[in-house]
Image (cartoon, grey):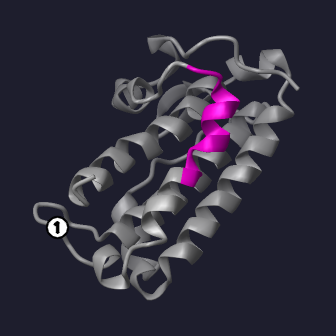
Amino acid sequence: MTHPQRRPQTDEYHEFYANYINCVPEGELFSLLEQQIAPLRSVLSGRSDEDVSTLHTPYTWTIKQVVGHLIDAEKLFGWRAHRFGCGDEAPLPGMNQNPYVDALNYESINIVTLIDELEFARKGNIAFLKRLADGDWDRVGKADGKPITVRALAYILVGHINHHWMIVQKRLGL
């Protein structure tokens, strides 16, 4: 098992992702990846369906929809890391998040089931990332026309959830 030895440098990703990477605390990447879902499960699984299905102004998604978006993004960023980590340099399209949330009817699914799906996706991504050789972390692919390294994508996995989790905690008054 290899580990990324450093945080991604700013030339490893498009500036759009800087906020997500800046949301990643210091620490060993795999520990961060492995421990990230438990706090969501702890807080959200005890909430009523009404709590997680309510829109909180000015936000446009319910908490269930936010968790659904986390699932979508986990799969998408993981797929990018998988493709680029294997040396597949075929460019990948960007992601318009709204059609995913609109089409997948996350409101009809129990919050615990959504968290389970997020955790399953995360475990798959961790298993893949742990198999990478040292040089694989530096591989570059293009997503949405912009170059990005596998290392940056792994950090984005953590930062993206942290970004949205901070907003959810604020919405819930935590």
Q: Position of residue 138 (x, y in %)?
A: 69, 17
For the stretch drawn in magenta, the main secondary structure is helix
The residue at the point 56 percent across, 26 percent down is 152
The residue at the point 29 percent across, 76 percent down is 51
How many labels, in total? 1
| Circle 1 SS class | loop
Which residue occupies the foreground of this view, 174 or 92? 174
Q: Is residue 12 shown above or below 48?
A: above
Magenta residues, as a range?
27-38
Which residue occupies the foreground of this view, 37 or 17? 37
| Residue type for callout 1 | His
Q: Position of residue 144 (x, y in %)?
A: 46, 40
The quarter of the displayed image where residue 120 is located: bottom right
How many other residues sit within 10 Å of disc 1, few (<14), some (14-19) or many (≥20)?
Answer: some
Residue sitting farthest toward the left: 58
Along the horizontal axis of the image, is 170 left or right of 38? left
Q: Position of residue 161 (x, y in %)?
A: 46, 46
The quarter of the displayed image where residue 87 is located: top right
The answer to whether residue 80 of the structure is visible from this angle is no
The quarter of the displayed image where residue 118 is located: bottom right
The residue under label 1 is 56
Which residue occupies the foreground of this view, 48 or 133? 48
Along the horizontal axis of the image, is 109 left or right of 89? left
In the picture, the quarter occupied by the N terminus is top right
Can residue 143 be found in the magenta stretch? no
Q: Is residue 138 shown above or below 158?
A: above
Along the horizontal axis of the image, is 172 left or right of 112? left
The residue at the point 63 percent across, 39 percent down is 33
